[in-house]
Image (spheres, rainbow, N blue to C red):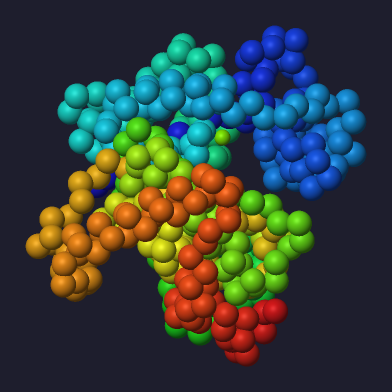
């Protein structure tokens, strides 16, 4: 049985501000964008008492908490502390999967012999983080990622919630379905219309009805509800990722409207990777809807890349699995998973990709093209050159998502 820890620093950006400026301690501190469309990145627990939440428009936060201290984010400082915290995590296992600067999964299954039971490891990590940085981190311990994440959330702030092995389904059963990954407001309402409010009710619900109503997502949700989440912790050595993210001037209506933005972001990410001399295997799409619900989808490539075309094709696949059924306010493209060995040529077939006549030759030509594109961008500015042909292709992976709103007709939920 795997032992997974989910660790999440409490109100991270706001806590760092209070750590660095003692005058802010005990005060409602709100870190975020201050422009017209700015949103709250983090709110201290004092600010949360006024109903301020992360992802809320800053304008709304000011209305709810006029006496709050509003600060712009200081990412270099957050990154510095994040590195210290992740250094603590890596003392206990090399299997650390960062989700953001302040959140990570740890697989400590094989750390038990050296460091003791997972709950004990979580307790030690918490005290080492506090001693090393002055910050508090909440921990969830479970035998799968999803349950560990829910557990850490339930204990916040400064919590430690351990789900004993084999009791995941019972732990989840009384919780509302909205706690499950992938169940946002729209899905929650649709489930409610079917008479499903708790995770336990979802786990007992006939799978066939869920599949008719939600497609493959229905079967997936039901498995999660039953505590079945076999996703492994994917270590991201060095905790590095390279990304590009934009909030749009206006919300974009659907998947197709996102493609030019995603191509642009793929091109920018590829260029930054090449500047840094990095190639990554994991391509992650982040989508934030107009209602601020957020989804991420990731693909793992058979080999590391710094090529915009490869990143963009992976992002299209991610987009097809993102279920774009509402207007979108933000997208982000991230590449991570650096430092992993490239599959040997003989292994390529394992991944379903038939080896090209000479993949090495193709790679060399593409690298030369990318170097030329970089030189042009240096001279004429980022965004001046773009592989426009990529946009003209019909992205087959998108078709299911575009059809998404048309599906159904069964089930009364709207
Ligand atoms: Mg956090």
Quarter of the image that includes the C terminus:
bottom right
Q: Judge whether 284 appears above or below 234 on screen.
A: below
The residue positioned 25% from the left and 25% from the top of the image is 116
Residue 409 seen in this snapshot:
yes
Rendered position, 23 above or below 216: above
Q: Nearer the viewer, residue 342 or 86?
A: 342
Up-down: is 31 above or below 377?
above
| Left or right relative to 366: residue 254 | right
- Residue 188, position in %: x, y? 63, 65
Residue 381 in percent (x, y) is at 58, 48
* Residue that appears at 67% across and 20% down: 17
In terms of image quadrants, where is residue 216? bottom left
**Left or right of 161: which side holds 56?**
right
Q: Is residue 302 left or right of residue 82?
A: left
Residue 217: x percent and y percent? 48, 72
Please tell me which residue lies in front, 368 or 16.
368
Q: Quadrant of ligand 1?
A: top right
Quadrant in which residue 302 is drawn: bottom left
Q: How many marks?
A: 0
> Is 283 placed left or right of 402 in the picture?
left
């Amino acid at each position: 049985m795997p032992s997974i820890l989910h660790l999440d620093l409490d109100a991270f950006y706001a806590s760092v501000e209070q750590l660095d400026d003692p005058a802010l301690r005990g005060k409602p501190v709100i870190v975020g964008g201050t422009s017209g469309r700015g949103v709250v990145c983090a709110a201290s627990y004092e600010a949360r008492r006024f109903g301020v939440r992360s992802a809320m428009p800053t304008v709304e936060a000011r209305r709810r908490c006029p006496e709050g201290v509003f600060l712009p984010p200081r990412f270099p400082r957050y990154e510095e502390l994040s590195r210290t915290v992740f250094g603590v995590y890596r003392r206990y296992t090399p299997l650390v999967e960062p989700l953001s600067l302040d959140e990570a999964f740890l697989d400590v299954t094989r750390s038990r012999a050296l460091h003791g039971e997972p709950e004990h490891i979580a307790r030690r990590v918490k005290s080492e983080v506090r001693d090393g940085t002055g910050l508090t981190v909440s921990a969830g311990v479970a035998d799968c990622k999803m349950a560990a994440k829910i557990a850490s959330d339930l204990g916040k702030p400064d919590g430690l919630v351990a789900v004993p092995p084999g009791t995941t389904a019972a732990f989840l059963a009384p919780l509302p379905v909205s706690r499950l990954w992938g169940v946002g407001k729209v899905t929650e309402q649709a489930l409610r219309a079917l008479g499903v409010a708790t995770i336990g009710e979802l786990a007992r619900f006939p799978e066939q009805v869920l599949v008719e109503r939600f497609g493959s997502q229905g079967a997936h949700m039901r498995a999660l509800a039953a505590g079945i989440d076999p996703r492994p912790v994917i270590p991201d050595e060095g905790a590095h990722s390279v990304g590009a993210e934009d909030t749009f001037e206006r919300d974009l209506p659907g998947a197709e409207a996102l493609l030019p933005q995603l191509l642009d972001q793929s091109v920018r990410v590829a260029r930054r990777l090449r500047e840094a001399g990095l190639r990554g295997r994991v391509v992650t799409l982040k989508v934030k809807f107009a209602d601020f619900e957020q989804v991420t989808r990731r693909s793992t490539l058979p080999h590391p890349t710094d090529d915009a075309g490869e990143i963009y094709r992976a992002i299209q696949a991610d987009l097809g699995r993102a279920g774009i059924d509402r207007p979108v306010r933000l997208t982000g493209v991230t590449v991570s998973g650096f430092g992993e060995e490239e599959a040997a040529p003989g292994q390529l077939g394992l991944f379903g990709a038939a080896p090209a006549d000479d993949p090495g030759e193709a790679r060399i030509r593409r690298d030369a093209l990318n170097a030329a594109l970089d030189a042009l961008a240096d001279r004429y500015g980022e965004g001046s050159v773009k592989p426009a042909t990529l946009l003209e292709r019909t992205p087959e992976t998108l078709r299911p998502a575009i059809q998404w709103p048309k599906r159904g007709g069964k089930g009364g939920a709207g």
